[in-house]
């Protein structure tokens, strides 16, 4: 539409200039002069040329320039005003983060089990490589339909063949996603797209496999619980042993320190100066003087 308007304005301007020139100079065979009306007629000519030589790239998009003479340019245009030749066409491609959800993506594991996934992929057209998207797919919709889901399935299939079904559904799940994401990053980059994220919303391996996984998880938990109890009992036994050894060492130290001289001193410290009878009916007296020799 813009090109058509430009052509019409140019044609009208040329017709006005020529027409006014002929009327003004019909009696002047060898001269041609521009008057004010002819100069005013140049305005639509300039407008027409200007409309076809200036382009505006919308916000959150990138412009890809195509020329009938040189084909698709590798130099992309950022948002804003740009100059171009009348023979160039500018195609805009959205550069906001895109999202594609895919259901029932089926992969096979290295133990010959099949796993169905519901996945979500986020990606974004790379500004400097947007010409690749245009050359390969023309529009973002075509890109979305043709490679986003297909590449995601290829990456997941390639990685899942390295793991068994139990590992993928268990503690290796994040590792699988990380490896698949690295593959997608490389695959998308070749198409002019920046990979953002891969999310698995659901995994279904069938009732039989899921029951086996549940049973294994229960058994694993029981083993962990038993191991924890064993470790606790060992810890308590070690603590008691350490306490007993400490007490024995303390008693041994005390026994070593109780020499005869120390005993005499302790008896003297506690003696009140009176002699007590010790023994039976014979009234034998305890002679403390013997202890003081």
Image (cartoon, helix red, strand yellow):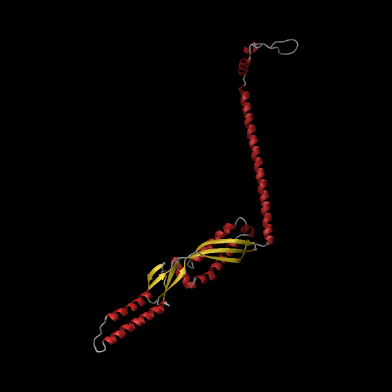
Left-right relation of 21 to 209: left
193 vs 257, nearest the viewer: 193
Residue occupying image coordinates x 34% and y 78%: 44
- Give residue 168's quadrant in the image: bottom right
x then y, percent, for residue 204: 64, 62
Image: 25 above or below 290: below
Q: Residue furthest front?
A: 37
The quarter of the rendered structure image containing the C terminus is top right
Residue occupying image coordinates x 62% and y 29%: 249
x then y, percent, for residue 228: 65, 45
- Give residue 37's quadrant in the image: bottom left
275 vs 249, nearest the viewer: 275
Left-right relation of 212 to 183: right
Query: What is the tally of numbered marks visible in this picture?
Result: 0
x then y, percent, for residue 38: 29, 81
The quarter of the rendered structure image containing the N terminus is bottom left
82 vs 198, nearest the viewer: 82
Q: Residue furthest right?
A: 281
x then y, percent, for residue 232: 65, 42
Image: 258 above or below 17: above
Residue occupying image coordinates x 68% and y 61%: 207
């Amino acid at each position: 539409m813009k090109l058509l308007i430009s052509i019409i304005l140019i044609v009208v301007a040329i017709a006005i200039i020529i027409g006014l020139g002929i009327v003004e100079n019909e009696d002047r065979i060898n001269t041609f002069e521009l008057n004010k009306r002819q100069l005013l007629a140049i305005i639509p000519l300039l407008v027409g040329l200007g409309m076809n030589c200036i382009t505006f790239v919308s916000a959150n998009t990138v412009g890809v320039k195509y020329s009938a003479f040189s084909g698709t340019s590798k130099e992309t245009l950022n948002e804003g005003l740009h100059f171009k030749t009348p023979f160039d066409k500018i195609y805009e491609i959205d550069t906001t983060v895109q999202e594609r959800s895919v259901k029932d993506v089926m992969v096979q594991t290295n133990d010959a089990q099949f796993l169905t996934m519901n996945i979500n992929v986020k990606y974004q057209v790379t500004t400097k490589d947007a010409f690749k998207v245009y050359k390969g797919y023309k529009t973002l919709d075509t890109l979305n339909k043709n490679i986003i889901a297909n590449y995601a399935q290829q990456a997941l299939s390639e990685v899942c063949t390295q793991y068994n079904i139990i590992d993928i559904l268990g503690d290796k799940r994040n590792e699988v996603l990380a490896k698949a994401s690295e593959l997608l990053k490389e695959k998308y980059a070749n198409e002019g797209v920046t990979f953002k994220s891969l999310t698995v919303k659901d995994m279904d391996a069938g009732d039989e496999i899921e029951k086996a996984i549940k049973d294994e998880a229960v058994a694993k938990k029981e083993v962990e619980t038993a191991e924890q109890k064993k470790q606790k009992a060992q810890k308590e036994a070690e603590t008691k042993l350490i306490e007993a050894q400490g007490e024995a060492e303390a008693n041994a130290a005390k026994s070593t320190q109780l020499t005869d001289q120390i005993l005499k001193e302790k008896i003297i410290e506690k003696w009140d100066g009176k002699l007590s009878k010790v023994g039976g009916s014979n009234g034998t007296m305890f002679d403390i003087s013997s202890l003081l020799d």
